[in-house]
Image (cartoon, coloured by chain):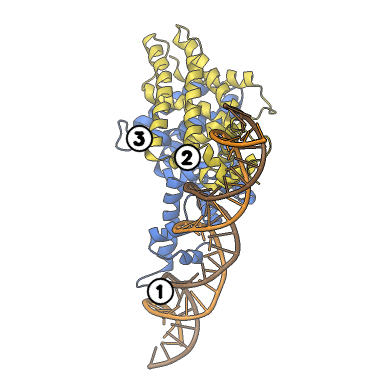
Chain colours: A yellow, B blue, C orange, D brown
Amino acid sequence: MARTQGSHSDITGPRIREAALRLFAQHGYAAVSMRQIAKEVGVQAGALYNYTPDKQSLLFNLMAGHMEELQAAWDAVPQSDSALERLRAFTGFHIRFHLERPDAVFIAYMELRNLTEENFTVIESLRRDYENGVEGILKKGVEQGVFAIPDTKIATLAVIAMLNGVNTWYRSEGRLSLDEVERVYWGMVQKAVST
Amino acid sequence: MARTQGSHSDITGPRIREAALRLFAQHGYAAVSMRQIAKEVGVQAGALYNYTPDKQSLLFNLMAGHMEELQAAWDAVPQSDSALERLRAFTGFHIRFHLERPDAVFIAYMELRNLTEENFTVIESLRRDYENGVEGILKKGVEQGVFAIPDTKIATLAVIAMLNGVNTWYRSEGRLSLDEVERVYWGMVQKAVST
DNA sequence: CTTTTTTCTGAACATCTGTTCAGTTATTGT
DNA sequence: ACAATAACTGAACAGATGTTCAGAAAAAAG
């Protein structure tokens, strides 16, 4: 046997990324072998190398793709003039975006140490861009006199860390709806930074 | 060669745990081999098995030890009658305790997926105990009328997630002192839950 | 129908994995 | 001085690791 029936590059490529994403999130990058990923796709390990130069690139592209999607999605959200309204929009956006892709989020936060130095630098830079956007909102709110924040950098990280926490416990079959979750978190975020 | 000069069980044991802790935190459980740990200690891989039945137990004992230390340390903190004061004490305690052992904290949160099912259950139970202590404070505050919280469980997780964020950015040589960090976070926590 | 290209297999590679264990040496107890 | 024990070595184990590559088969192009 060699090439099997119905095999296509444009199908196998995404399937490899999906399988890698799920497996990396579940067991961790180092604990997942190329053969496991291949098995999930229904292909031999060697075939993966038609789609990625190596395992490291597979991880890096998943992470970079996620961070770029995140930034692009946030850039597409219309921005109000009010800093308070911007922060509310961000809270909702961040919670929803992250709950929609728990695996990608998990990897982007947990597998940083398995990146090469260069790849790590790239991802960290993307993350900083995103954080700077949030800090911009907080700074604007301080200027407008609606936020009282001794250190906007810390507040940025604190808010993001708090919101990221949702992913550790939220289940769609659970007690609370997405809207309720959003409302509860917005209540805390708002109070935490307000004057 | 076999037993080397000046070798002692009561020295090697802790050194193995220290090396494993550092390496697991740095590269991840799955990415670290028993031979790497042994090399760090200055011993052959086989010698590790005088101190741990296997690699999994090494991880589990590090995590369980950390969680028990955490709970014991918090239990030792004197508790006020005021829920507000209790929460302030918790904020300071949690930040300081976690900043003192970044590696153990990192492992306890990141390597859960590398635990066997039974071991995972144990660790999760210890974590829930700790979280329940915090939720008790918030509930008490609601009773006393000083906290306004729609959902104490979510608020508990949100506060802890926010505080855990410190470990991702704090450096002792950095811009802020521990006292300042504690003050800034307490300001946000207090406002987030207060009436 | 024939050629070319794309997609994949299956085997091979050198190296690393966790773990076991017989044997060796330093230390402790008598 | 000798025996017993604790601590460790070094080799071995069966299997897994990422990656390469010649060749085979299916699909596309002519």
Distance, label 1 to label 3, CA atoms, is: 45 Å
Q: Residue A61 appears at what percent x and percent y?
A: 48, 33
Chain name for mark 3: B
Which of discs 1 and 2 lies nearer the camera? The answer is: 2
Total marks drawn? Answer: 3
SS at circle 1: loop
Name the amino acid, label 3: Leu
Cα gap from disc 3 to disc 2, whole angstroms: 45 Å
Q: What label does residue B3 carry, if any?
A: 1
Q: Label 2 lies in what chain?
A: A
- In terms of depth relative to the viewer, which is nearer, B124 or A63? A63
**3D distance between C-alphas at marks 1 and 2:** 46 Å
Is disc 2 on the same chain as disc 1? no
* Helix, strand or loop for disc 2: loop
Q: Which residue is mark 2?
A: A53
Q: Earlier in the sequence, mark 1 or mark 3?
A: 1
